[in-house]
Amino acid sequence: MDIPEKVAARLRELPDKPGCYLMRDRRGTIIYVGKAVSLRKRVRSYFRAGTLRRADPKLRGLVRAVADIDWIVQRSEAHAVIAEGQLIKEYKPRYNVDFKDDKRFPLLRLDIDQPFPRLTLCRLRRDDGAQYFGPYRASQAARVAHEFVEKTFGLRRCRPRVPGIDDHKHCIDDIVRFCAAPCVGKVDSAGYRARVTEAAAFLRGERPAYLKALRSEMERAGAARDYERAAALRDTLLPLTAAVKERAIRAGGMARPVMDVQAGMTALRSILRLPHDPRRIEAYDISNISGTYAVGAMVCFEDGVPQRKRYRRFRIRTIEGSNDPAMMAEMVTRRFERLRGDGGAPPDLVLVDGGLTQLRAARQALDRGGWHAVPMAALAKRFEELYTARDETPIRLPADSPALRILRVLRDESHRFALGYHRRLRGQRIRESVLDEIPGIGTDRKAALLKVFGSVRRLAQASETQLASVSGVGPKTAALIYGRLHAPD
């Protein structure tokens, strides 16, 4: 069998590391997802002549259909098992019909249909309306997360559906485990629900402040030479941090390659001559068409994990025409003015999408605001060259550089976020401009029409009778709308 040139090149690049591989057909569709202890050995085995001679028709059909291969490096085989399951559920590749996941990893289950929900450990995800968190790669991490959440948010452990005073008689959880004790009315249903909502947000990775508080407590215990307590807090913090971060990474989407984050941050520190690893990075991008509907976007990653609560969108206000550097300067200026007003700490690194002109404009904007110490770099689109404010000569990073992987993910995420906002704004403006040109179509009628038909395109396909059936429109207005939408140019 002749191996396509692109596939052959990908086979040469495969790392000898554990992970998941994704096989694509000529249209780019993912047709198979697999896991491996060694990506290099496993994926190359598909294309050996001996393997194909002994293979069944399904495997031969798969290999013939492969036009490209991607992979996601994982830290261990257990990590790869979880990632494989997530990818298969997301993409449903047609050659994975025989996939079975016999290994059950621990989950945390929150039955939100109960009057006073409780958090439990389980190993099977059911379609029962409950919220599930995980799976966790290690039982220890799941147990630590379970214990921490119950104590921190005052969730009950007792089994009665509605606990009462009789249940409290032989329970001391409100004393030794900080239970909110709804059984004796220390908290009402609404107050307990608020605790449950906060606990779920923490398990989704949306409440990092709790981990910061735990770390501060550990550091205080160490400074006071209470080493036994400091060690106990450390043993709680480490698996809990890993578990919450893992959940946040999965929530951010498995389609993006998982990076060796620590290696990437260390490489960036060296390349950019930073005082410490850039744990928090903000990336900025501009999106417009010849200066129209100009918007900007900022995304934020901490330790390689997207912090969606910190993402920001910007409508460009002061720049007319196509001037990306000036738009970048406006966005950076507004972002850091807001940061100063909120009393927040600056990021460890600012990354702007573009070349030297975008970098200079953003750098000058920061300097004018007094943010001279904030490091900044730019990643150009065409050749993925890295620019710094120190030197006009771009830095060409190797394709397999962990620093470049981090920068690519940040650049791509900021571009996706900016483009999505631009498209939404442009579509909204187009809809409004068309309907606003029709006399008698006010805000209420416009909203009613778009609610029924969803878009102007579908509105134009409707008959007068269908238009007249919309609440508040009527036959006369329907005839006016129909005539305007179908008038010759």
Image (cartoon, rainbow, N blue to C red):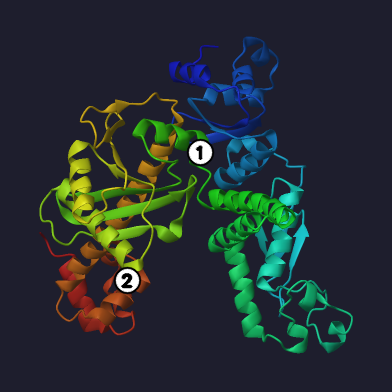
Residue at image location 41% in from the left, 36% down from the top: 269
Q: Secondary structure at mark 2?
A: helix
Residue toward you, 405 or 38: 405
x then y, percent, for residue 454: 35, 67
Residue corresponding to mark 1 = 261
Q: Name the residue: 46% across, 34% down.
A: 266
Instruction: Inspect this view and state whether residue 135 appears.
Output: no
Q: Quadrant of the N terminus?
A: top right
Mark 2 or 1, nearer chain start: 1
- Residue 450 got which mark? 2
For marks 2 and 1, give the CA distance.
Answer: 45 Å
Residue at 61% over, 66% down: 200
Question: Which three-letter amino acid code belongs to the residue tagged 2?
Answer: Leu
Mark 2 neighbour density, 10 Å: few (under 14) some (14–19) many (20 or more): some
Q: Residues within 10 Å of mark 1 (few under 14, many from 20)?
A: some
Q: Residue furthest right?
A: 170
Q: Which numbered dot is residue 359?
A: none
Q: Residue, x 88% and y 84% (percent of image)?
A: 169
Left or right: residue 149 versus residue 435 is right
Up the image or down, 26 lies above or below 194; here it is: above
